[in-house]
Image (tube, grey):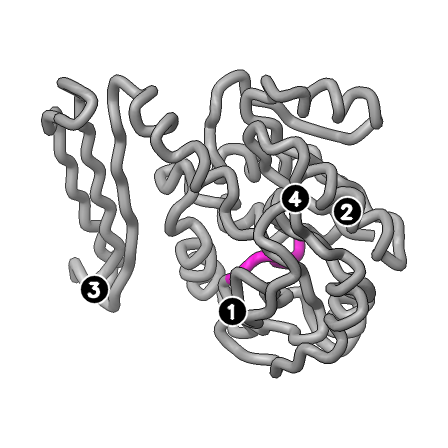
Amino acid sequence: MFSIIIPTFNNINYLKLCIYSIKKNSNYNHEIILHINEGTDGTLDYAKLNNIKYSYSKINNGICVGFNKSLEIAKSEYIVYAHDDMYFCPEWDNVFIDEINKLKNKIFYLSGIMINKGHIKYSCGDDLTNFNEEKLLKDYLNLDHHDFQGSTWAPTLLSKKICKDVGGLSEEYSPGTGSDPDLNMKLWQKGVRIFKGLSKCKVYHFGSVVTRQKEKKIVTSFHDLFFSMKGSSDDGVFYLSAQFSQKSETSWKLISLLAVMRFPSKKLC
């Protein structure tokens, strides 16, 4: 039914729970695609042993590159983007399917809502050691929220065609911070006007577990740091890129700075 893309970086125990929840709580068979960054914790072997489809980077290329690599091998008409530290609650896929059937075209961006680290503040555990699955499954239906317009959050669903048309996630945002709203900007420019969060499509989110645990390792392992951002206004589109070289553990030197403003052709007339 859906191709569920899950970028992962040495987070095998949370990933196993995520995949377990998809298989347990889905009403349809979905194509699960991992993008494995490094996989030195056994993730690569786990995917092979369990015949899980995956793309692979020997180093940590982040979410954006990983998502785009997995997008290239996705077979389903619709893409679901998820984090590896999410637990999918029952009926999540039926909620998406019911909404798709109500819409007249495929020009939309749908998302679920997150329990714990997200829209609904309700704890069933902070990590795997104290996660209370029984409590979650007993109570999740009673955790009220409302549908809303303007969503940029995972889990995300959109058509594979429109995702490819806008180039997937912008890799200049790697490892991933800021890529979600940027994707929404590109979709808006493509004509998408439905950005809808569905209150009955729920996941439990432990909350950027890898980012918290690996932050120091990621920063100090680079000799060069690249920073870039992109945005737009009525006057055009801008792109800013900077490169820093690491002098010491806490010191960086600016090597290059590039700023580009691209104006629509009508502005030059």
Q: CA distance from mark 2 to mark 1?
A: 23 Å
Q: Which residue is mark 4?
A: 129
Number of the front mark, 2 or 1: 1
Dividing the picture into quarters, in which one does residue 101 lie?
bottom right
Q: Secondary structure at mark 1?
A: loop
Q: Residues within 10 Å of mark 2 (few under 14, many from 20)?
A: some
Identified by mark 2, the residue type is: Ser
Q: CA distance from mark 2 to mark 4?
A: 35 Å
Please indicate, yes or no, whether residue 107 appears anywhere in the rendered image: no
Which segment is the magenta one?
A: 153-160
Q: CA distance from mark 1 to mark 4?
A: 31 Å
Residue 40 place in picture, x, y as percent: 59, 17
Q: Secondary structure at mark 2?
A: loop
Q: Which residue is mark 1?
A: 151
Q: Residue at x 45, y 65 (%)?
A: 188
Number of the front mark, 2 or 4: 4
Name which of mark 4 and mark 3 comes first in the sequence: 4
Identified by mark 1, the residue type is: Ser
Identified by mark 4, the residue type is: Thr
Identified by mark 3, the residue type is: Asp
* Mark carried by residue 82: none
* Mark carried by residue 235: 3
Name which of mark 3 and mark 1 comes first in the sequence: 1
Name which of mark 2 and mark 4 comes first in the sequence: 2
Q: Residue at x 76, y 56 (%)?
A: 133
Contact between labelled residues 1 and 3, with CB atoms less than 8 Å apart: no
Q: Which residue is mark 2?
A: 76
